Amino acid sequence: MKPLNLPVLVTSLAAILCVSHSWSAPPKIPINKLNVTLKLPKPDLVFGKIQLKLTNKCQRFKPAIVATVRVRNIGKVASPAKMNVGMVNAKDMHPVGWGNGKGFKSIRAGHYIIVTFPIFYLVANPGHIPGTHTFKFRLNSAKWIKESNYNNNSHHTSITIPRGYCKPRLGLTFKKPDLIPILFKPMTGKVAVRNIGAANAGKSLLLIKCSAAQAGGCAENTAMSPYINPAYPNYVVVKIPALAPGQVYSHILKFWKSLKWKKGKYRFIAKADGSNIIAESNEGNNTTFSWLAK
């Protein structure tokens, strides 16, 4: 029996084991990352025809005007129904709080509906009713529903209400003017006087006084000099031209934007016919107030 040649086997096995194999990571497969923004279609409400008409009977707690509005959906999908909010509303451009609104049902894409709602007799200020009024109409003013475009949701329409159309307040004297002052709240520097009486009012003065709730007083500067009248110290004096019944005179105080206000609270009182030269039907409504907080 021949002896085994172990060295040869070992050498051969070693040779096999010594064969080197290089390792590398698997190739990276490029992945294209897509930023996909999915835009869902939305409704888009716009105004069509708007009509304001006087009612047949104008008196307290009754409609004075009826608004008829065509609302069109030019968007891609139907608008949801919103019956419990003023989806369409109208408001007098004068700051007297006169107006109204109404909700409406769903509108299919490409279709329209007609919405009708009343604007009631202005119990708080009946003298404001006669004259020409511009109402600002708005759709979805508080963004109750999502739209593709919110910039086409407003429109303006005017109506003239003749004197004597509405029943008067009890005790109103129709043979005299009646001047009332108007201030915005908070104070903006814009002031106005309206003649809510039944006769022409001659030229008059509007007096405005500021008082501060803290030390230091109200803001002042030299730009106020055209409004100073020695006969009325501590007042800003605005000259008001003659006003016909229902007419309003508005004025922006030229010095207002240049005033430097300290932190605090300020109160403003305005008095129409400050010199008491106009014989009015009501002398008890010549003052109003406003405020400013800094």
Image (cartoon, rainbow, N blue to C red):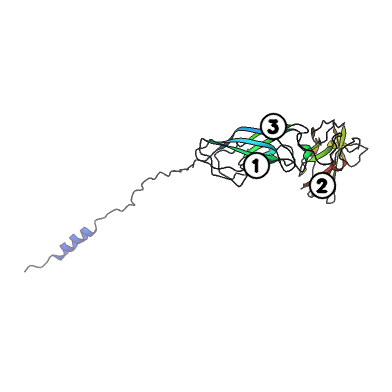
Q: In this view, which residue lies farthest toward the bottom?
A: 1
Give me the C-alpha separation between circle 3 and circle 1. Answer: 16 Å
The three-letter code of the residue at mark 1 reads Gly
Which residue in the structure is indicated by mark 1? Answer: 101
Side of 7 where 86 appears, left or right: right
Q: In this view, which residue lies farthest toward the right?
A: 231
Tag 1, which secondary structure? strand
**Quadrant of the drawing holding the N terminus:** bottom left
Give me the C-alpha separation between circle 1 and circle 2. Answer: 33 Å
From the top left corner, tell me how far across and down residue 31 is, in percent.
39, 45
Q: Which mark is residue 267?
A: 2
Tag 2, which secondary structure? strand
Give me the C-alpha separation between circle 3 and circle 2. Answer: 34 Å
The three-letter code of the residue at mark 3 reads Ser
Q: Dividing the picture into quarters, in which one does residue 254 lie?
A: top right
Tag 3, which secondary structure? strand
**Sooner in the amino-acid sequence: mark 1 or mark 2:** 1
Rendered position, 11 above or below 62: below
From the viewer's perspective, is the residue at label 1 or at label 2 nearer?
Answer: 1
The three-letter code of the residue at mark 2 reads Arg
From the top left corner, tell me how far across and down residue 186 is, in percent.
76, 44
Q: Nearer the viewer, residue 104 or 76?
A: 104
Side of 67 where 248 appears, left or right: right
Q: Dividing the picture into quarters, in which one does residue 268 lie?
A: top right
Dot 2, how many residues are within 10 Å of its Cα: few (below 14), some (14-19), or many (20+)? some
From the top left corner, tell me how far across and down residue 234 is, in percent.
89, 42
Which residue in the structure is indicated by mark 3? Answer: 158
Dot 1, how many residues are within 10 Å of its Cα: few (below 14), some (14-19), or many (20+)? many
For residue 118, say whether it is visible: yes
